[in-house]
Amino acid sequence: MFRKKGKLKKIAAILAIVIMTAVLGGCNSLDDAVAKAKPLIPKGYDLVKVEQVSDNSGIVFYTFEEELSTGIFTKNSFGWKWTGSAVGKLVTYPDGLQWRYADLGEDGTQYSVYYGKITNKNIVRVTVTTIGGEKVQGKIVNTDQLRLWYAFVSEPQVPSVSADITGYSAEGKVIYLFSQPKQ
Protein backbone atom coordinates (compact mmCIF):
# COMPACT_ATOMS: atom_id res chain seq x y z
CA MET A 1 0.00 0.00 0.00
CA PHE A 2 2.84 2.41 0.81
CA ARG A 3 4.49 1.56 -2.51
CA LYS A 4 1.33 2.53 -4.41
CA LYS A 5 1.16 5.90 -2.62
CA GLY A 6 4.84 6.54 -3.38
CA LYS A 7 4.38 5.72 -7.06
CA LEU A 8 1.27 7.90 -7.25
CA LYS A 9 3.15 10.80 -5.63
CA LYS A 10 6.02 10.41 -8.11
CA ILE A 11 3.61 10.29 -11.06
CA ALA A 12 1.72 13.32 -9.74
CA ALA A 13 4.97 15.24 -9.23
CA ILE A 14 6.21 14.42 -12.74
CA LEU A 15 2.83 15.36 -14.22
CA ALA A 16 2.86 18.67 -12.29
CA ILE A 17 6.36 19.48 -13.60
CA VAL A 18 5.33 18.69 -17.18
CA ILE A 19 2.22 20.88 -16.88
CA MET A 20 4.14 23.79 -15.29
CA THR A 21 6.82 23.57 -17.98
CA ALA A 22 4.18 23.64 -20.72
CA VAL A 23 2.31 26.58 -19.19
CA LEU A 24 5.27 28.69 -18.13
CA GLY A 25 7.80 27.61 -20.71
CA GLY A 26 6.95 29.96 -23.55
CA CYS A 27 5.29 29.84 -26.92
CA ASN A 28 5.99 27.86 -30.07
CA SER A 29 5.93 30.87 -32.42
CA LEU A 30 7.03 34.47 -32.14
CA ASP A 31 3.52 35.67 -33.06
CA ASP A 32 2.06 33.53 -30.25
CA ALA A 33 4.58 35.01 -27.80
CA VAL A 34 3.65 38.56 -28.85
CA ALA A 35 -0.04 37.77 -28.38
CA LYS A 36 0.65 36.23 -24.97
CA ALA A 37 2.63 39.34 -23.90
CA LYS A 38 -0.21 41.71 -24.86
CA PRO A 39 -1.45 42.06 -21.25
CA LEU A 40 2.04 43.33 -20.31
CA ILE A 41 1.80 46.22 -22.77
CA PRO A 42 0.40 49.48 -21.34
CA LYS A 43 -3.05 50.52 -22.54
CA GLY A 44 -3.03 52.80 -25.55
CA TYR A 45 0.02 51.22 -27.20
CA ASP A 46 -0.56 49.73 -30.63
CA LEU A 47 1.43 46.87 -32.11
CA VAL A 48 3.08 48.08 -35.32
CA LYS A 49 5.50 45.35 -36.37
CA VAL A 50 6.89 41.98 -35.32
CA GLU A 51 10.21 41.05 -36.93
CA GLN A 52 12.16 37.84 -36.40
CA VAL A 53 15.81 38.90 -36.24
CA SER A 54 17.43 35.46 -35.99
CA ASP A 55 16.48 31.88 -35.20
CA ASN A 56 16.55 32.78 -31.51
CA SER A 57 15.44 36.42 -31.29
CA GLY A 58 12.74 38.78 -32.45
CA ILE A 59 11.99 42.47 -32.11
CA VAL A 60 8.57 44.05 -31.79
CA PHE A 61 7.56 47.69 -32.20
CA TYR A 62 4.70 49.54 -30.50
CA THR A 63 3.50 53.12 -30.90
CA PHE A 64 1.75 55.46 -28.52
CA GLU A 65 0.91 58.83 -30.04
CA GLU A 66 4.30 60.02 -31.37
CA GLU A 67 6.36 57.62 -29.24
CA LEU A 68 7.90 54.38 -30.44
CA SER A 69 8.80 51.55 -28.10
CA THR A 70 10.39 48.20 -28.70
CA GLY A 71 10.59 44.80 -27.09
CA ILE A 72 12.83 41.79 -27.50
CA PHE A 73 11.75 38.17 -27.51
CA THR A 74 14.22 35.30 -27.25
CA LYS A 75 13.79 31.63 -27.93
CA ASN A 76 15.07 28.82 -25.77
CA SER A 77 14.33 25.09 -25.67
CA PHE A 78 10.89 25.81 -24.15
CA GLY A 79 9.80 28.40 -26.75
CA TRP A 80 9.65 32.18 -27.13
CA LYS A 81 9.63 34.53 -24.16
CA TRP A 82 9.58 38.27 -23.50
CA THR A 83 13.12 39.42 -22.64
CA GLY A 84 12.89 43.19 -22.25
CA SER A 85 11.43 46.40 -23.54
CA ALA A 86 12.23 50.09 -23.91
CA VAL A 87 10.09 53.15 -24.08
CA GLY A 88 10.96 56.82 -24.18
CA LYS A 89 11.35 59.90 -26.27
CA LEU A 90 12.99 59.69 -29.65
CA VAL A 91 15.80 62.01 -30.72
CA THR A 92 14.14 64.06 -33.45
CA TYR A 93 17.00 66.37 -34.50
CA PRO A 94 18.02 66.78 -37.24
CA ASP A 95 14.94 66.18 -39.39
CA GLY A 96 14.62 63.02 -41.45
CA LEU A 97 15.29 60.27 -38.96
CA GLN A 98 14.21 59.71 -35.37
CA TRP A 99 15.99 57.33 -33.05
CA ARG A 100 16.52 55.97 -29.59
CA TYR A 101 18.97 53.58 -27.95
CA ALA A 102 18.16 50.77 -25.51
CA ASP A 103 19.92 47.99 -23.64
CA LEU A 104 17.47 45.11 -23.33
CA GLY A 105 17.79 41.69 -21.84
CA GLU A 106 17.82 39.47 -18.81
CA ASP A 107 19.68 36.50 -17.34
CA GLY A 108 23.02 37.67 -18.71
CA THR A 109 21.76 38.06 -22.28
CA GLN A 110 22.05 41.67 -23.42
CA TYR A 111 20.78 43.27 -26.62
CA SER A 112 22.05 46.75 -27.42
CA VAL A 113 19.89 48.31 -30.11
CA TYR A 114 19.37 51.63 -31.86
CA TYR A 115 15.90 51.96 -33.34
CA GLY A 116 13.49 54.56 -34.63
CA LYS A 117 11.41 56.04 -37.41
CA ILE A 118 12.44 57.22 -40.86
CA THR A 119 10.54 60.39 -41.72
CA ASN A 120 12.45 61.36 -44.88
CA LYS A 121 11.21 59.14 -47.73
CA ASN A 122 14.56 59.56 -49.53
CA ILE A 123 16.49 57.68 -46.82
CA VAL A 124 17.04 54.13 -48.05
CA ARG A 125 19.95 53.05 -45.84
CA VAL A 126 20.92 53.75 -42.23
CA THR A 127 24.23 53.05 -40.48
CA VAL A 128 25.33 53.39 -36.87
CA THR A 129 28.99 53.92 -36.02
CA THR A 130 29.51 53.25 -32.31
CA ILE A 131 31.82 55.03 -29.91
CA GLY A 132 34.20 52.08 -30.30
CA GLY A 133 34.27 52.39 -34.11
CA GLU A 134 31.95 49.47 -34.94
CA LYS A 135 29.90 50.27 -38.06
CA VAL A 136 26.55 48.51 -38.26
CA GLN A 137 24.08 48.52 -41.15
CA GLY A 138 20.55 49.21 -39.92
CA LYS A 139 17.57 47.16 -41.04
CA ILE A 140 14.72 49.20 -42.52
CA VAL A 141 11.22 47.84 -41.95
CA ASN A 142 8.16 49.13 -43.78
CA THR A 143 4.75 48.98 -42.14
CA ASP A 144 1.37 50.30 -43.23
CA GLN A 145 1.82 53.42 -41.10
CA LEU A 146 5.58 53.91 -40.65
CA ARG A 147 9.06 53.23 -41.90
CA LEU A 148 11.06 51.88 -39.00
CA TRP A 149 14.69 50.97 -38.59
CA TYR A 150 16.86 49.16 -36.07
CA ALA A 151 20.51 48.21 -35.65
CA PHE A 152 21.97 45.85 -33.05
CA VAL A 153 25.44 46.77 -31.83
CA SER A 154 27.82 44.39 -30.06
CA GLU A 155 28.47 46.43 -26.89
CA PRO A 156 26.46 48.76 -24.65
CA GLN A 157 26.84 52.41 -25.67
CA VAL A 158 27.41 54.94 -22.90
CA PRO A 159 26.69 57.65 -23.74
CA SER A 160 24.50 56.51 -26.60
CA VAL A 161 24.47 59.96 -28.20
CA SER A 162 28.19 59.62 -28.96
CA ALA A 163 27.43 57.25 -31.85
CA ASP A 164 27.16 58.57 -35.39
CA ILE A 165 23.85 57.79 -37.08
CA THR A 166 23.79 58.31 -40.82
CA GLY A 167 20.96 58.14 -43.37
CA TYR A 168 21.76 57.72 -47.06
CA SER A 169 19.86 58.32 -50.29
CA ALA A 170 19.61 55.72 -53.07
CA GLU A 171 22.63 57.40 -54.70
CA GLY A 172 24.71 56.95 -51.53
CA LYS A 173 24.56 60.62 -50.55
CA VAL A 174 24.43 61.43 -46.82
CA ILE A 175 21.08 63.13 -46.22
CA TYR A 176 20.90 62.64 -42.44
CA LEU A 177 23.72 62.81 -39.91
CA PHE A 178 23.58 62.80 -36.14
CA SER A 179 27.10 63.25 -34.81
CA GLN A 180 28.29 64.75 -31.57
CA PRO A 181 31.73 66.40 -31.38
CA LYS A 182 34.34 63.76 -30.45
CA GLN A 183 36.94 64.44 -27.78
Image (spheres, rainbow, N blue to C red):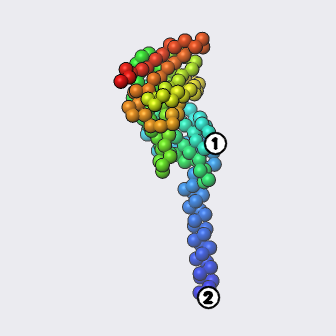
Q: Where is residue 40 in the image (x, y as percent from the top left)?
A: 47, 44
Q: Which residue is drawn at 62% across and 79% down?
A: 7
Q: Residues within 10 Å of mark 1 (few under 14, many from 20)?
A: few
Identity, as a three-letter code, of the amino acid under mark 1? Asp
Q: Which residue is drawn at 60% across and 69% down?
A: 14
Q: How crowded is mark 2: few (under 14 residues within 10 Å), some or many (20 or more)?
A: few
Say if residue 121 shows up in the picture.
no
Instruction: Compare residues 42 and 159 and report the one nearer the observer.
Output: 159
Q: Are marks 2 and 1 in contact (CB under 8 Å)?
A: no
Q: Where is residue 166 in the image (x, y as percent from the top left)?
A: 49, 20
Left or right for 180, reference 155 = left
Secondary structure under the numbered disc 1 in the rendered image:
loop
Quadrant of residue 86 in the image? top left
Q: Mark 2 points at which residue?
A: 1
Secondary structure under the numbered disc 2 in the rendered image:
loop
Quadrant of residue 92 in the image? top left
Q: Mark 1 points at which residue?
A: 55
Identity, as a three-letter code, of the amino acid under mark 2? Met
Where the N terminus falls, by quadrant? bottom right
Q: Given the current orientation, which residue lies at the most extreme left position?
A: 183
Q: Residue at x 48, y 51 (%)?
A: 107
Q: Given the current orientation, which residue lies at the most extreme bottom position?
A: 1
Q: 152 above or below 170?
A: below
Q: Position of residue 72 (x, y in %)?
A: 52, 40
Q: Distance of mark 2 from mark 1, alpha carbons? A: 50 Å
Instruction: Compare residues 124 and 13 and report the one nearer the observer.
Output: 124
Say if residue 109 shows up in the picture.
yes
Q: Residue at x 56, y 45 (%)?
A: 74
Where the C terminus falls, by quadrant? top left
Instruction: Compare residues 58 and 144 and report the one nearer the observer.
Output: 58
